[in-house]
Image (cartoon, grey):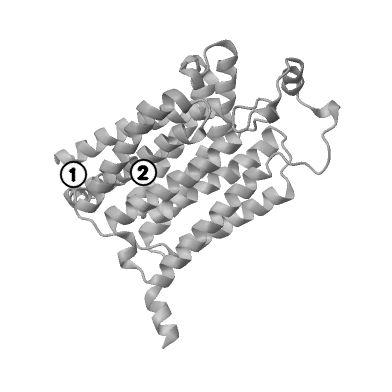
Amino acid sequence: MASHSWKDAYRGMSTDNIKGLVLALSSSLFIGASFIVKKKGLKKAGASGIRAGVGGYSYLYEPLWWVGMMTMIVGEIANFAAYAFAPAILVTPLGALSIIISAVLAHIILREKLHIFGVLGCVLCVVGSITIVLHAPQERPIESVTEVWDLATEPAFVLYAVLVLIAVFIIVFHYIPSYGQTHIMCYIGVCSLVGSLSVMSVKAIGIALKLTLSGMNQLVFPQTWAFTFIVLLCIITQMNYLNKALDTFNTAVVSPIYYVMFTSLTILASVIMFKDWDRQNPSQIITELCGFVTILSGTFLLHKTKDMVDGPIPLSVRSPKHMEDEEDGIDSESIPLRRQDTSIRSP
């Protein structure tokens, strides 16, 4: 009887979930690579113009930044498509794999040695991701974009959206002018809050396009274009404040905090809007949460040990930038969480 109930609770991954999984993995590959390229472009642009962290846009003239941007766009397109096939609870946590890819590429391209605890962090991320993949809910059957609009206009999600917008306006107009350059949560908070709304809209557009390609035209509905407008507005906002965060603070700090906040808020928004957990039993929900906590642990362990080495760094292998900063009298240890050029490692 117990075996029979277990089989009823877990029927394996659907075809749509598998498609979403493959697309999410592809997305992590491109996005992981883009972080390194974009960071190098921002640093190069900041050396010859006004830094993004203080309101500059010189990075727009830097080809390297655009290469990273195009790579990220490809990854986001794959991620966009993944949301059309699989629930956010499955797709969003897999973003942690982009951190692993970034660490591996940093090891290969930037010749940054990955500490043994960093390897353990990667393993934890993989284990957590597999746990979530195996226990993720099946995609909710939706036959029209108007159904998604009805879900988005239910009182519970409307309340969530209103609270998010109020929080964003308070952070942007009250906290960022005074604390944006010293408190990382200002920029990351805006990106994460807006990001949770953008993912819900992206999923709605993905569903609309999937239905349209299958023969049920959803482009005639105004709700499709309303979701499109929301996505564009949210993406522009996210790009602006994420660039500020990357240029102002250490990337090794930005990436895990942004991942944790963005993923947590996105899962919360998905649970409220699409009621993902209504189709699961308590054991599946607890298992998913354990998988998510495992990913969080791996993410923080990976970044916490990213710059650790097994012994003191010989003077002969220290970077020229490191020595230049010391000659200028810059003490990176005295500026916690602030941009530290002597220890910045692109993820």
- Distance from label 1 to label 2 (Cα)? 23 Å
Give whichever of discs 1 and 2 has the lower sequence position. Answer: 2
Tell me the quarter of the image containing the C terminus.
top right
Name the amino acid type tagged 1: Gln
Query: Would you identify the image quadrant in which residue 316 lies?
Result: top right
Query: Would you identify the image quadrant in which residue 172 lies?
Result: top left
The residue drawn where x is 34% and y is 38% is 167
Does dot 2 land on a helix, a strand or a loop? Answer: helix
Residue 23 appearing in the image? no
Residue 222 lies, with reference to residue 180, above or below; the image says below
Q: Position of residue 44 (x, y in %)?
A: 59, 18
Q: Give the label on residue 218, or none.
A: 1
> Which residue is label 2 attached to?
196
Q: Which of 301 and 183 is in front in this view?
A: 183
Q: Position of residue 248 (x, y in %)?
A: 54, 26
Residue 145 appearing in the image? yes
Image depth: mark 1 or mark 2 in front: 2
Does dot 1 land on a helix, a strand or a loop? Answer: loop
Name the amino acid type tagged 2: Ser
Q: Position of residue 141 (x, y in %)?
A: 25, 59
